[in-house]
Image (tube, helix red, strand yellow):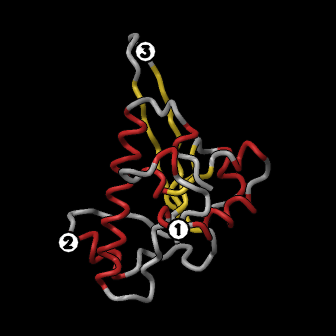
């Protein structure tokens, strides 16, 4: 399962704020390094008009230094990332994508499986469609949170 990692590079050359968000995807295990997305992922992305030009890569401890936020798809990935984190500062960057879904926010509990985006691997195409639906909803919440200035970090933290 892939993680998303984001870095916020803000600049204001003319007095206004310009936010540029760099997003990358990487797995917590080496199984798919260098490979294109799974055929069912690519199929569902194409149906939705999403172009994926990405090859598998593995998230490393060094990546914590490159990103402000590390977003896991499920609680197992959170555990993997927390184990990989070199220190408490790195661990504090980890959250689940589902924490950004509509109606979640501050009341989310760390053990709430509802925050997980299940891995569709090995399932029928419908599972990939469901996963994309969940990711799109949560990403809409993530973008809203970023647009608001990402000021309340605690409302999205859900290790």
Give the foreground label among 1 and 2. 1
Image side of residue 65 versus residue 147, left or right: right
Residue position for label 3: 13
Residue at 27% from the left image edge and 77% from the top image edge: 43
For the residues marked 1 and 3, what is the alpha-carbon distance in whole angstroms?
A: 43 Å
Residue position for label 2: 47
Q: Splitting the image into 4 quarters, where does residue 66 fall? A: top right
Contact? badges 1 and 3 (CB < 8 Å): no
Q: Position of residue 134 (x, y in %)?
A: 36, 64
Which circle marks residue 103 in the picture? none
Q: Nearer the viewer, residue 140 or 55?
A: 140
The numbered mark, 3 or 2, whose residue comes first in the sequence reads 3
Q: Position of residue 79 (x, y in %)?
A: 68, 65
The numbered mark, 1 or 3, whose residue comes first in the sequence reads 3
Identify whether 141 is placed above or below 59: above
Q: Position of residue 60 (x, y in %)?
A: 68, 60
Give the SS element for disc 3.
loop
Give the SS element for disc 2.
helix
Residue at 38% from the left image edge and 50% from the top image edge: 103
Quick one: quadrant of the C terminus? bottom right
Residue position for label 1: 113
Give the foreground label among 1 and 3. 1
Image side of residue 31 versus residue 141, left or right: right
For the residues marked 3 and 2, what is the alpha-carbon distance in whole angstroms?
A: 40 Å
Give the SS element for disc 1.
helix
Image side of residue 60 versus residue 25, left or right: right
Contact? badges 1 and 2 (CB < 8 Å): no
Q: Position of residue 9 (x, y in %)?
A: 50, 32
The numbered mark, 1 or 2, whose residue comes first in the sequence reads 2
């Amino acid at each position: 399962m892939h993680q998303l990692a984001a870095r916020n590079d803000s600049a204001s050359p003319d007095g206004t704020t310009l936010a540029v968000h760099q997003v990358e995807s990487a797995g917590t295990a080496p199984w798919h390094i260098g490979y294109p997305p799974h055929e069912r992922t690519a199929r569902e992305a194409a149906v939705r008009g999403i172009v994926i030009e990405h090859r598998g890569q593995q998230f490393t401890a060094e990546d914590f230094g490159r990103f402000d936020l590390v977003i896991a798809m499920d609680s197992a990935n959170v555990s993997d990332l927390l184990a990989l984190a070199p220190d408490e500062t790195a661990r504090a960057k980890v959250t689940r994508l589902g924490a950004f879904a509509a109606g979640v926010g501050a009341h989310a509990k760390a053990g709430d499986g509802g925050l997980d985006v299940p891995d569709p691997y090995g399932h029928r195409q419908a599972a990939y469609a469901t996963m994309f639906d969940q990711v799109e909803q949560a990403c809409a919440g993530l973008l809203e949170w970023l647009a608001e200035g990402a000021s309340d970090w605690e409302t999205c933290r859900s290790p």
